[in-house]
Image (spheres, rainbow, N blue to C red):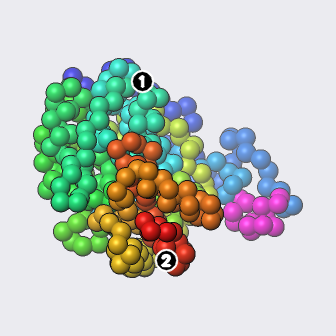
Amino acid sequence: MSRFASHLADHTIVNPFPGLVRLEQTIGRPVTVRIGSNESVAEPTSPLVARFGPALAELARTYPDPYAQVLRARLAALAGVAPEEVLVDTGADSLILLALRLFCAPGDTVVTSAGTYPTFRYFAEGCGTRIEEVPYHEAQGLRRPDLAGLAERARARQARLVYLANPDNPTGWNASGDAIRTLVEALPEDCTLLLDEAYSDFCIETADRPLAGVLPGAFRLRTLSKAYALAGLRVGYAVAPAGWIGKADEIRPQFAVSSVAQAAAAAVLDEPTYSARLVSDTVQLRQTLERALSDRGLQVLPSWTNFVAIRYDSAATAAARQQALWAAGVAVHRPPHPAMQDLLRVTAHPDALQTSILDGLCLTR
């Protein structure tokens, strides 16, 4: 059976607008006059020039490279893979939807943890798949995805795809690389692991870092939203076997990642110490927040991310704390899934260390 969705397996889809970079490669010379894309003329009085400068105005005026080839090369070097093993899209969320479209047809079964990142279910429902949820493993005050349970359910239901966020959102838990490899090996031959590694940049210890390179059987997602501070520009990338990437490129909205986003991503990637400083500062903030919350008697789950999850004695208690903070104009997140509503998720941010907010999170306030 083909790895791809049944309607895609024997069908090649050709992009009608591959962009100027591909055209330059085809004709073997630079394009110096752009009169084929129906772009607007440059307008010096554009309000973008006054507000953001002429460079951004020019980027906004012109169509982007649909394949983001310059950015792909940088991201491939970052991930230690070949450019043809990388695909760029508008954040990890869009890549989740792309993976579902690539590997699943309506009626296919997908498996995930009961209460993990809810956008997966949101897209899976829209794609017409049957969703199987596996409860989290609970032991000694910890809550983590049940990897063996995910594999067992995938085999029992002949699932086409298993979704795993690692590190997990909302618990913050991180499974080891060996555990991830064991999971992939335990899945049915034609079942794909959709491995969402959006928070993996915060796994700074060697033993916690994700596996290097392409992982056979897995479609891996990364983002520049967290460790590169580009959440508003929506830049994410996938790492997978080249054949999968090529097929995904056939069905991806080709102009989705804007010229502005591509240029900004290249700029932050070209500054070698920027992300490392941001990650280090964030981890220190998270550790300070963890200590402050623990000192107030709260149960804080272990985290390998840029947030902490506080576990309360009941969903009602967590809701009461959230509503009290809302009344003060403070936004904290309570996961929508019933299995996770005893948690509040708090971002590692200097504002979270304000005494009034720390006190507002406590049970006795």
Which quadrant does the N terminus fall into? top left
Measured as percent of width and height from the top left, residue 297 is found at 35, 72
Residue that carries the numbered disc 1 in the rendered image = 128
**Looking at the image, which residue is at 15% across and 53% down?**
179
Q: Nearer the viewer, residue 291 or 312?
A: 312
Measured as percent of width and height from the top left, residue 164 is found at 29, 46
Find the magenta span and give its range. Answer: 46-58
Left or right of 296 in this view: 161: left
> Measured along the vertical axis of the image, is residue 133 above or below residue 20?
above
Measured as percent of width and height from the top left, residue 145 is found at 24, 49
Circle on res. 330: none
Left or right of 246 in this view: 333: right
Residue that carries the numbered disc 2 in the rendered image = 353
Amino acid type, residue under disc 2 in the picture: Leu
Furthest-front residue in this view:
364
Measured as percent of width and height from the top left, residue 11 is found at 38, 22
**Few, some or many C-alpha atoms within 10 Å of disc 1 (few <14, some 14-19, many ≥20)?**
some
